[in-house]
Image: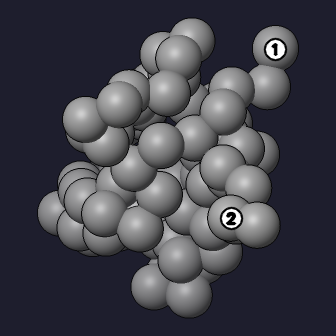
Amino acid sequence: MTDPIPTADGVIAHLNERFAARGVTFRVDSLHVLPYVNPMWLANWELDTVPPEAETEIVEQEVADARWHFPQILGTW
């Protein structure tokens, strides 16, 4: 049996945990998730918004890392 596809909630929790560990005050509330799993295994999610006052470089690094580890996720509708 294969591992289940992670959900948006799991990725949000992962990102918020990483931001807290790195001292970033910004937290993710939601992700934009395409309503299908891409057969090419391209990431099917994006961060909705990042406020300008957020520590953008760290946020971008953590999001890029999460997109590598969680390329395909299921939304929570």
Report the front residue among 25 and 73: 73
Residue 55 appears in the picture as rendered: no
Does residue 72 appear to the left or right of 74 in the view shown?
left
- Position of 20 with respect to 42 (left or right) is right
Q: Amino acid at mark 2?
A: Thr
Residue 11 in sight here: yes
Q: Looking at the picture, does residue 3 appear above or below residue 28?
A: below
Which type of secondary structure does the marked residue at label 1 adopt?
loop
Residue placed at 57% from the left, 41% from the top?
73
Extreme residue toward the right, this view: 77
Q: Nearer the viewer, mark 2 or mark 1?
A: 2
User: Which residue corresponds to mark 1?
Assistant: 77
On screen, residue 23 above or below 35: below
Identify the image quadrant of the N terminus. Answer: bottom right
Image spot of residue 60 (x, y percent):
24, 57
| Quadrant in the rendering for residue 7 | top right
Q: Residue at x 79, y 25 (%)?
A: 76
Task: Judge the density around disc 1: few (<14), some (14-19), many (≥20) Cα neighbours within 10 Å.
Answer: few
The kind of secondary structure element at disc 2 is loop
Could you say which quadrant of the image residue 2 lies in? bottom right
- Above or below residue 28? Residue 67 is below
Q: Position of residue 40 (x, y in %)?
A: 25, 35
The image quadrant of residue 63 is bottom left
Q: Which mark is residue 2?
A: 2
Quarter of the picture holding the C terminus = top right
Q: CA distance from mark 2 to mark 1?
A: 23 Å
**Residue kind at label 1, given as amino acid type:** Trp
Q: Label 2: few (<14), some or many (≥20) within 10 Å? A: few
